[in-house]
Image (cartoon, rainbow, N blue to C red):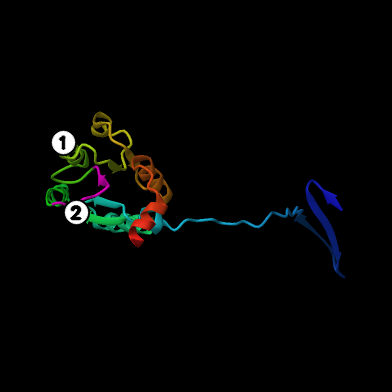
């Protein structure tokens, strides 16, 4: 018997009667899911990211996420090291920096990079959404903790689309 969305059944034993209420489950058949993914390495193979964070664990995790997304990662533990690498000829497509670092903040690093390399996109990572230095500097920001998908979406918004076919042809040639 059905009552209030539950099935009621009775079971009689020698000593007593037990009632069990079981939920009614309506099964739906769905079309099989097909997951289509592009090889991230083919999408971002030629893209280089300079990643800056003073926290070695966050630096390692973030670098792993970026590599999984197919980027070539150059990681630095300070703003000074990042500036030295750029001045030494390191060519990158994007700089991703932590905001709160000792000696040189991510916003200070971004200002110095903007002065020397005005076309180089910069993404700031922070756990403080309302930090006044970020708002004043008008910097693209991603909040920590972030997912690989959120990071990928931010990067896609900052970098122009790369023609995957052209990149594959240039690598083959």
Q: Which residues are magenta?
A: 89-99
Residue under label 1, please give it: 115
From this view, report whether residue 127 is shown above or below residue 133.
below
In the visual, does 33 lie left or right of 112? right
Q: Position of residue 81 (x, y in %)?
A: 14, 51
Which residue reaches farthest front?
A: 173
> How packed is label 2: few (under 14 Cα within 10 Å), some, or many (20 or more)?
some
Q: Position of residue 85 (x, y in %)?
A: 15, 52
Q: How many marks?
A: 2
For the residues labelled 2 and 1, the Cα–Cα distance comes to: 21 Å
56 within the magenta span: no
Q: Is residue 70 visible?
A: no
Check if mark 2's residue and mark 1's residue have beta carbons within 8 Å.
no
Q: Quadrant of the C terminus?
A: bottom left
Residue under label 2, please give it: 77
Element under disc 2: loop
In depth, the one of 71 and 148 nearer the eye is 71
- On residue 88, the disc is none
């Amino acid at each position: 018997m059905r009552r209030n969305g539950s099935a009621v059944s009775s079971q009689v034993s020698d000593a007593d009667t037990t009632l069990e209420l079981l939920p009614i489950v309506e099964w739906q058949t769905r079309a099989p899911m097909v997951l289509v993914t592009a090889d991230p390495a083919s999408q971002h193979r030629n893209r280089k990211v300079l990643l800056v964070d003073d926290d070695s664990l966050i630096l390692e995790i973030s670098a792993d996420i970026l590599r999984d997304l197919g980027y070539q990662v150059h990681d630095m533990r300070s703003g000074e090291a990042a500036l030295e690498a750029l001045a030494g000829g390191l060519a990158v497509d994007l700089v991703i920096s932590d905001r709160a670092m000792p000696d040189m903040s991510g916003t200070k690093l971004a200002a110095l990079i903007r002065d020397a390399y005005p076309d180089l996109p910069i993404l700031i990572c922070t756990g403080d959404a309302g930090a006044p230095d970020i708002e004043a500097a008008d910097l693209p920001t991603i909040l920590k903790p972030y997912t690989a998908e959120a990071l990928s979406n931010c990067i896609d918004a900052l970098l122009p689309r790369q023609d995957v076919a052209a990149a594959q042809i240039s690598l083959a040639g």
